[in-house]
Image (cartoon, helix red, strand yellow):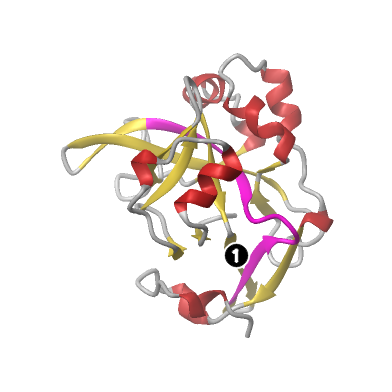
Amino acid sequence: MCGRFDIQLPTESLGKIYQADIANIEDFTPRYNIAPAQFAPVLFGDTKREFDFARFGMHPDWFKFKSRDLTNLWKETLLDKPFFRHRLEQNRCILPVSGFYEWKRSGGRKTPFRFRPAEDEVFSLACIWEIGTFRGQKSPSFAIITGPSNGIMKPVHDRMPVILKDEFVGGWLDPETEMDNLIDMMGRYSDSGMESYRVSTRVNNPRNDDASLIEPT
């Protein structure tokens, strides 16, 4: 669905694209293989638009799998649990990515593909967040909302991250946006807005994090 992604833009570019404060992420350098439990720059906007680092993966107290995090959430069931409904109502954020990875299964083999914007510099992924405790310190954590795949994604996986259109960024961050409008914003992303290609199996290992990972193979 979306367990790995890359962010290549410098912080100055992220600030300009989203018209947001980047003071908290000035030391961020390009990443090519961000994995669950790692930190990434995320855009918040409940009071003002600003970036901050957040941990990829939420772990509510009631979650029964102690060694796992919730990294992806189905948009179709977000309203079923009060925990997620409340965060969709109040705790929304955006993860800007230059691309993301998904694996195509064929028999016992998994082939990695990268999905990137066809024209724009970033995808704005719809996320929700909470405050969690990690290594004794409190920090924000986030999960990516997913939905059914479009035509580009379908041959690889039947689900994909919810990608917000540019005109929905402000409304997604605005805590006053009504639920019906939020649901409408999470529509299927256009095939023409993205492209994909196969990449090296080196991306399978999250310890590998260099520019060669995004090159076509």
* Residue placed most toward the observer, 82 or 177: 177
Magenta: main secondary structure = strand
Left or right, 155 with respect to 142, comes to right
Which image quarter holds the C terminus?
Answer: bottom right
Quadrant position of residue 136? top left
Amino acid on which disc 1 is placed: Glu
Give the farthest residue toward the left. Answer: 136
- Identify the secondary structure beneath mark 1: strand
For the residue pair 94 and 142, the one nearer the viewer reads as: 94
Q: Residue furthest bottom?
A: 217
In the displayed structure image, the side of residue 205 where residue 195 appears, left or right: right
Instruction: Please report the residue visible at 60 percent of the width from the left and 14 percent of the height from the top.
Output: 176
Q: Quick one: 128 or 93, which is closer to the camera? A: 93
- Image spot of residue 193 (x, y percent): 78, 55
**Up/down of 38 relative to 84, above or below:** below
Q: Examine the structure image and report whether residue 154 is included in the region drawn in magenta.
A: no
- Please state the extent of the stretch shown in magenta in the rendering: 111-130
Q: Which residue is mark 1?
A: 102
Residue 184 position by quadrant: top right
Quarter of the image for residue 33 reads bottom left
Report whether 73 appears left or right of 152: left
153 in relation to 148, above or below: below
Residue 4 appearing in the image:
yes
Residue 17 percent location from the top left of the image: 60, 44
